[in-house]
Amino acid sequence: MSDQNPLAGSIFPPSPEFVAQANVSGMAAYQALYDEAAARPEQFWGHLAETELAWQQKFDHVFEWAPPFSKWFVGGQLNASYNCLDRHLDGPRAHKAAIIWEGEPGDTRTITYTELHRLVCRFANSIKSLGYQTGDRAIIYMPMVPEAVVAMLACARLGIIHSVVFGGFSAEALKARIQDLGATLVITADGGWRRAKEVKLKPAVDEALLECPEVKHTIVLRRTGSEPEMMEGRDLWWHTLDETSHDDCPAVPVDSEHPLFVLYTSGTTGKPKGILHTTAGYLLQTTMSMKWVFDLKENDVYWCSADIGWVTGHSYITYGPLSAGATNVMYEGTPDTPAFDRWWQLIAKYKVTLFYTSPTAIRALIRQGDQWPDAHDLSSLRLLGSVGEPINPAAWEWYHRVIGKGRCPIVDTWWQTETGAILIAPMPGAVPLKPGSGTLPMPGILAEVVDLDGKPVPPDAEGYLIIRRPWPSMIRNIWGDPDRYAQTYWGRMEGVYFTGDAARRDADGYFWVLGRVDDVMNVSGHRLSTMEVESALVRHPAVAEAAVVAKPHEITGQAVCCFVTLKKGDYNHDVLGKELRQWVAHEIGAFARPEEIRFSEALPKTRSGKIMRRLLREIVTSNTVAGDVTTLEDMGVLTRLAAQQDEP
Ligand code: PRX
């Protein structure tokens, strides 16, 4: 796919029709919100918290900041599940569809807010009957079924801290997360459907639990009907528990700063970090972005194609949309099953109005040709969203023209697991779009592009993207590791949140995020650390040393490329290469499977022994090395690594 920029310099102002109906209508309205939040942040957020959330007890004050720790809406009490469910039951939303779900085999369910409330209460009662309570930790390892949302909201209802582990993670990765979190409950399923095959989940739980003695129970949803092994006393069927549960389960009021969930993501070391989000601030900002960024209206049908296991699924399938009272489409499978028009068919079938997906998915679908979307009526769409990585101009142009028929604004949303909610994105009825730019920050977000000393760089110059002031949905801590939290995010520049992204800001103040500046890769919009893959590789008995870099990839944005040196022995490189790719999939998950393994006698290192990843990146990107190699210990290694590319 050509990445020549067909849209260089193009600006797409919102159409008058869109402006006329928008929640934030016109640039002056955006500017007024932004200025108000910048000038009087406490009043701004305090007022929104009071009017947009339901409280069991009102907060005393808005904000406390003892760098790097912040507290929002201090002294208040509320419940996230109550905000996503109960408060909608008094009026016309009671019988509105909360979730319209479709399984990959074609089975469907429509669940109203009343029904979802009932399911959540019943499941919360099931958990309660087993003795779990506020402050306990539960792992959710499930396919994309409504019960995944039910499980999250049931935990939230009781003040139980949940951690959803993406179903694509392996038993090893699951085990590490259970242990780090000290979870005592695992909620899972027999499996789910993906590309017409069952992806089993329960066997991975069984394997993980061999080394997690603290887990007292697993609750297993029957989804596929395969008969997993059930360990007497530990493993319980969801439906069996449900038989004796009742419909009434009052939501437990928790403190504004009560942990809502921990979500593990990759950092720059081999150990994933548990990003901690708390209740009120997170809920407020995810709710507001539904209105500000997605321009949500009462009759919209909203669909976010992310998996519940990533932060996008948390903020923009569960908490944001349900707190805002949206109708949420949820789909279990992949876009190519049974054919490449599955998504377009779903949009037509459910008359989706707001569609949110990733550039990787868009690129994969472009490749299949326009005949797939063209065969369906996509005229219900009124807004498109993008998340996870910079969207390249060719993908933007296609998304806009072929899916949006030139009518739909594209909201390119920049944010992170740590930010909790969207921080940089256009308000679609106000901000003119520039393809490839997340445009302007949300109200209350003081984003800047700076140099290493924290000084703003001139327009169009590259620098580090930072946020100057805390915001309500911000990460509160890394689970069990406050030092790492302080260092990673607040230790680079005094009192400033360091995003880890490079960016530039143009003369109009628009942000252009360029990618990570650390050793974090972005594969299909999924975050993966080079160190995590390296640690997995060196656990293999044949591997002496490994260096992992990202290489550009046409569809997935980046792909994992590994340089490996072996211990003494006689190896068949073809066989071992396959084995190592499988090994990484086993250690982390199938989505982390390396694209390429290159074997080498040694790795390029500085005299102090540091692997020169920069040179390896150059090799995989351009196959030549242009950078400074004066500190390189063994030039011959480099030449041989580069030459491997040409071998048959
Ligand atoms: O590099 C940025 C990229 O994804 C990183 C965050 O990854 P994660 O925590 O997994 O969250 C993904 C979903 C929010 C960021 O540091 N990123 C995310 N969205 C964009 C983006 N890069 C450019 N443009 C975006 N819209």
Image (cartoon, helix red, strand yellow):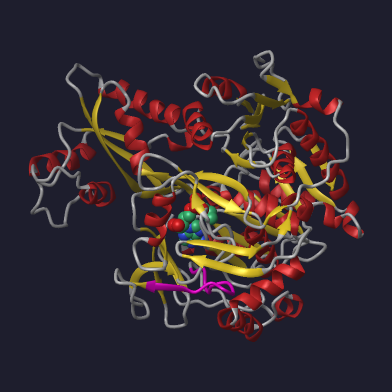
Residue 542 position within the rendered picture, expressed as x and y whole percent measured from the top left: 26, 22
Up the image or down, 154 lies above or below 500; here it is above
Asked whether 439 falls inside the magenta stretch, the response is: yes
Left or right of 271 in this view: 433: right
Residue at point 57%, 62% (across, down): 71
Residue 327 position within the rendered picture, expressed as x and y whole percent measured from the top left: 78, 54
Q: Main secondary structure of the magenta part?
A: loop
**How many marks can you see?**
0
Left or right of 241 in this view: 405: left
* Quadrant assignment for the N terminus: bottom left
Q: Can the viewer see residue 184 in this picture? A: yes
* The magenta segment: 437-449
State which quadrant residue 116 falls in: top right
* Quadrant assignment for the C terminus: top left
Asked whether 248 falls inside the magenta stretch, the response is: no
Q: Can the viewer see residue 371 in this picture? A: no
Left or right of 421 in this view: 447: left
The residue lying toward the viewer, choosing from 426 and 467, is 467
Residue at point 63%, 41% (across, down): 162
Residue at point 51%, 33% (across, down): 169
The residue lying toward the viewer, choosing from 63 and 232, is 63
Up the image or down, 464 lies above or below 176; here it is below
Residue 30 position within the rendered picture, expressed as x and y whole percent measured from the top left: 63, 80
Residue placed furthest toward the bottom = 28
Up the image or down, 647 lies above or below 405; here it is above
